[in-house]
Each structure stands twice: as structure tokens, then as C-alpha cells.
Amino acid sequence: MSNQNPLLVQGSFVSVYLEYKSITYSKHKQMFSRLSKNISIGIGSVLIGVVISIPAAHLFGADSPSVAYLKGKTLSPWSIMALSVVGESPALDSLKVVAALKAIDLETPILALTAAGENPRTFGGEDLVAKLKTFYDGTQLGETGVINDDIFGLLALLASGEKNDDSIVVGIKNFILSTQNADGGFSFAVTGTSDTNTTAAAIMTLRALGMASSESPVQQAVLYLKSAQNEDGGFPYDPKSSWGTASDASSDAWVLLAIKALGEDSATWQKSGKTPLMHLETLKQENGSYLYQAGGIEDSFTPVTTSYALLALSGKTLPVRVQSFDVPAEASFSIQVEGKDKFLCDTDGTAKTALDALKKASDACGFSYHLQSSTLGEYVDEIAGEKAFGSAGWLYAVNKKLASVGAGAYTLREGDAVRWYFGNFDGTSAREDVRTEIPLSVSIPQSTSGGDGSVGAEKPVSEERVVSMTVELGKATTETLGFGTASIGKPMTKTIALKNSGAVATTLSTAVSGDAVFRRYLRLNEKTWRDYRVQLSANTSTTTSLSLSIPADYEGSGAKTGALIFWATPIAQ
């Protein structure tokens, strides 16, 4: 990890944990024991508060050494959470770009953003909640051999305002419950032995879901924790570990957070007259940090351990805050997908984002696409086998405007026209010579209902004459093909001359974008525009008739705009 920015890999400690175990386990059992405890919590833990009697000014005032200690260290999602709950406003720059190679990569940043009052669906131009949900496989979230990412993933979803009856939330909950061990505890990994940290986090998750403390899964988990308490009042990571069972600050903090979630007073959790809070305070240093265990030294994980301790002492629980951000509703859209040298899809549907629209188009038209993950987020690098290369790749525009955010973060509005196309990274199409777009317009008068129930226009409209327009394929045109003022129930016609000035014969097909009135009612050569196909030899012209017939029961009115797109696909010689 020395060559990576630690701010971009927060939540990725699981991979470090597994790598360290496989490489150094046989040689450094004791050292690994400590690291594994720290790492497994740092990656998959959540923070919860506890009922305490320490004066708030001592913990969180301007002279608080713990707050000053964390502010002097590089910020992580955990320290952002801890500082946020004590009234600080930590910088969030480190969360503007979140790597998303695994579910766990997203979970602590989401918890940190919600703790700081930010919306993880829009912060940094990416919908982190939508990304997290893509790791759900229908049974569990994230890696199949790990429970940790399911527990913290569920906490992250709940913190983001996802409802308890959401299908993914319910699925993850059921999976977590199915993994509870016979001793009542929960393990970091599937089929693993119970540990206090994961069990405490599971209790917080079940309580956040609304499960009562008296229900069996919670009660069994509580009994496991109480059985693990040491004589010094503190808690070990694993009370049965052959690598050591000494109490540690991280485990103390997690259990205190769970006690808060249960609505109990930590003073009642005593062993030999000592409580976990008493033991935790024995590990506090003059500089405000909390050492992992007695006799230890400050190391790279000390800021994380200190963050856990501060969260546990803050009187909060996980999730620190539940943000009731509005979840974007699905909106109706139209979409065209255009490859380097062929038209791939034109369809309608409903979706939340521009990326969702591409997914719907993929299902409707039967093409594949691929998402590439990077530190800048996910992007589409391949559609229908056409891969990005050099300075060209897949772009998207909404209502003819290139978007400035990732497709997964672009929230669609009703009636949006989405265009995915293979183009140059300056926004121009890579093959503009085979695409011709003609602007469309029509004005629809407000309809009134007569006494006999008939529908008519407010003002008499004379029938429009036939007008011709010449379009040379591959040449940009700014001339609008206007249908004028519509006569409801009567067809309005146009004739356009199309010229192929190239040296290769082509097959013409069409797409229509913009207002639904054109997508629904525009016909070419007496066929729907989707069925239009014309072969045009090199250096020849043809005419195509257009008709727009708006039915009497159409409810819209006003000026409508759209575009008729001709796509010329070369005919193989």
C-alpha cells in the first residue's frame, strides 16, 4: 500500500488483511494477531456511541487532545465520522473520488459522508449508493466469503435513507442472520469463528433495521459479547484466539457502540467491578490518542483506533446519521445508441440515471456493454464490442448537451433524450459523416371540448401545404423542419430530398429524439420511423415523405421540438 493514496483506499483494508495473512502468518503470529484485529475493524466497522459520564468539554471542547490529535493526522472516513459527531467540520476532499473495486471500498466513505451531512448520491458527481447496490448478487453484498462487507454495506444503505423494506436491504439482512454462529456471535468471514468486533457491528445493524433488543438474534449476540468480557472490564477481539486474548481499545469501542445501540448503560456491563469504558480510558495517551493495547506504541493504525474511541464516547451510534435525501424517481426517457459505423439502438423506457438508461437499452436491443472501474469512478469503455481507444471512446449527451458528471450520477428528468455515441473526447462524433440530424418543430394549440363532446382547436387552422426540403447526408443542417401549427386529428405532411454524395452505397435508417409527440406520431413513407429502411446508391438522391398526425385525444399543447436523425450504414461491397 506504500504506493497508494491512503485516502483513496479507505475501506480496502480487507484485501490487506488477507494478503498479510497469507504471506506472513507462519512467521509473525503475534504481530498478525494485532494487525488483523485493527485491520478487520478499520475496514468493516461502524461507530456507535455510549452512555457515559465524562464531561463533554473534556472530550470535545477546543482543548480536547483527542480532537486535536485527529485533526493533526491525515483524514480518513473514520476520523471524518469521529470529528463530525463532535461538532467539527472536517475537509471532505478525500471523499470526492472513491475507488469502487469492491463493495467495502464504498461503505466507509458513504458512512462518513452521511455523518458529515452530505448526500452520497451526488457528492463528487457520483452516486455511491447506486454503485454499492451493484455489488449485490441477489443473495449477499460484495465478496462471497465475507460477512463484514454485508454488515457495513447495510449500515451504509440505511444511513443513505434506503428503506427497511427495500428488496436489497431485506436480502442482505436475511443473509446476515443466516450466518449467525451457534455461540450467538458473528464472524468477519463466512464459516469463521465469532469475534467481538463483527458481532458488535451486527448488533448495530439489526437495531438500525428496527429489530428489538429482546428478539432472539440480538439477545444471542449480546450473550456472546458478555461471555467475552475480560476481568479488566475490557474486550478482546476473539476470546478464544490462540494468538492472545488481551483487551484492546478497538474492541472496547465497538462493544460500547453496540451497548449504545441496545439502549443500555455501559456501567451495567461490569466484570469484577470494571467496565469497558474504564478499560478504554486506561489506553488514552497524553496526546489524545488511544493505543491498541497496554504496553503498545503509536503506529499507523492509532488514528483509526482513536477514531473508534471518540465515536464510542460521543453518545452516538451507527449509523451516525440517517439522511433522508430524496431518492430520485424514475423518469421516462428516449435513447439512441450509435456505434462507430452503425446504429445500435433506439428505445424508450423509464430510469433514474443516464447509466440506467443505457442498461435498459442493452436489455431492449440485445447489445452488451462494459464498465471500467478507476479512481475517477466507473465509465463505459465498451459497447457492442466497440472498445475505447486513443482519443476516442463512448460519450453521452442529454438533450444534445454533453454532461459534466458520470452517467451514474446524472439524474434524468421526465422526457429527457439520451444519446450514447462513439466519439472523440472533445465531444465530436468519431464518424459524423454517417449521421445527419434534422431539427423538428410543431406548435399544438390548446384543445377545448364542445357541448357535444367533440374536441377542436381554439382557433381555426388552415391545412398546411406540402413543403419540400433537401438534405445532403453527412452534412450538418441547422434548418428546422417545421410543421407549423397542428390541426388536431389531421395529418401534416412534408417531403424531404435525401442525397448520398459519397462514393459508397448506404442503407438509411432513422431515429427520433426530443418530445414524445414526434416519437409517437411521426411516420416516414407511411411507416413508423423505426421501420424506415431505404437503400441509396452512391451519388444518388431519393425522396421521403413525412407525416405527423396528432390524435384528437392528445392532451398536450404548446411548442414542441425534436430531431429526426438519419443514420447511413455503408453496404458491404
Image (cartoon, rainbow, N blue to C red):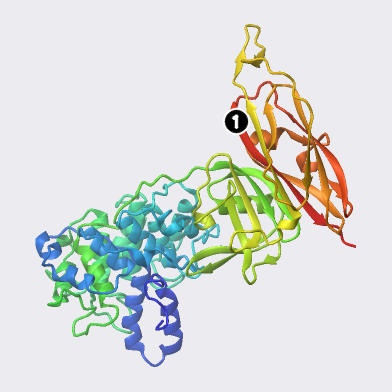
Residue lying furthest top in this view?
Answer: 451
**Relative to residue 471, is residue 210 drawn left or right?**
left
Nearer to the camera, 248 or 330: 330
Q: Position of residue 217 (x, y in %)?
A: 36, 57
Q: Badge 1 is on which residue?
A: 559
Q: Position of residue 498 (x, y in %)?
A: 82, 45
Reply above or below: 331 against 459. Answer: below
**Relative to residue 13, is residue 397 drawn left or right?**
right
Q: Is residue 72 visible?
A: yes
Corner quadrant of residue 341:
bottom right
Q: Is residue 275 visible?
A: no
Reply above or below: 459 against 135. Answer: above
Nearer to the camera, 99 or 492: 492
Nearer to the camera, 418 or 155: 418
Quadrant for the C terminus, please: bottom right
Q: Secondary structure at mark 1?
A: strand
Q: Position of residue 460 (x, y in %)?
A: 67, 15
Q: Amino acid at mark 1?
A: Ala
Quadrant for the N terminus, please: bottom left
Q: Residue at x 64, y 67 (%)?
A: 388
Q: Residue at x 65, y 39 (%)?
A: 562
Q: Residue at x 44, y 55 (%)?
A: 173
Nearer to the camera, 235 or 290: 290
